Amino acid sequence: MIYYVYMLKSKSVKPVTYVGYTNNLKKRIILHNSGKGAKFTRGRKWVLIYKEKFKSKKEAISREYYIKNNRAIRNKIKNENFNSASL
């Protein structure tokens, strides 16, 4: 099964980011935007700014943990995609 690590950015004046993993990226983003995703994401609208594909759940969880706990990586991803209209 394929797993994804993804980063979402809120559509707000002061945007925040959220990092997660899933095996169904499209469905997961829909859940986040409908208020049924993680508690942190409720009440906000989100846009996908980053995704990575993995062959195992273990790899995806490890990468998610790394990104969540490394502010420099998170900011780099956020800033690289800030002006990207292609996502």
Image (spheres, rainbow, N blue to C red):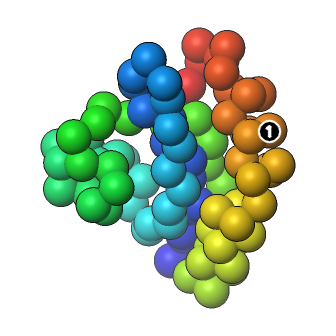
Mark 1 Cα-neighbour bin, 10 Å: few <14, some 14–19, many ≥20: few
State the SS at label 1. helix
Residue 8 appears in view? yes
Q: Residue 6 location, x and y as percent?
A: 56, 52
Which residue is at 30% across, 32% downward?
A: 45
- Which residue corresponds to mark 1? 76
| In the depicted structure, whether residue 78 falls above or below residue 87 | below
Which residue is at 82% across, 49% downward?
A: 72
Q: Residue 36 location, x and y as percent?
A: 18, 56
Q: Residue furthest bottom?
A: 58
Which residue is at 71% across, 48% downward?
A: 74
Left/right of residue 73 with respect to residue 58 in the rendered view = right
| In the depicted structure, whether residue 35 falls above or below residue 11 | below
Q: Amino acid at mark 1?
A: Lys
Nearest the viewer among 24 and 83 is 83
Which residue is at 60% across, 18% downward?
A: 86
Residue 28 appears in view? no
Quadrant where the C terminus is found in the figure = top right
Q: Quadrant of residue 5?
A: bottom right
Left/right of residue 56 with respect to residue 72 in the rendered view = left
Nearest the viewer among 1 and 45 is 45
Count all numbered tags in the image, as a single digit.
Answer: 1
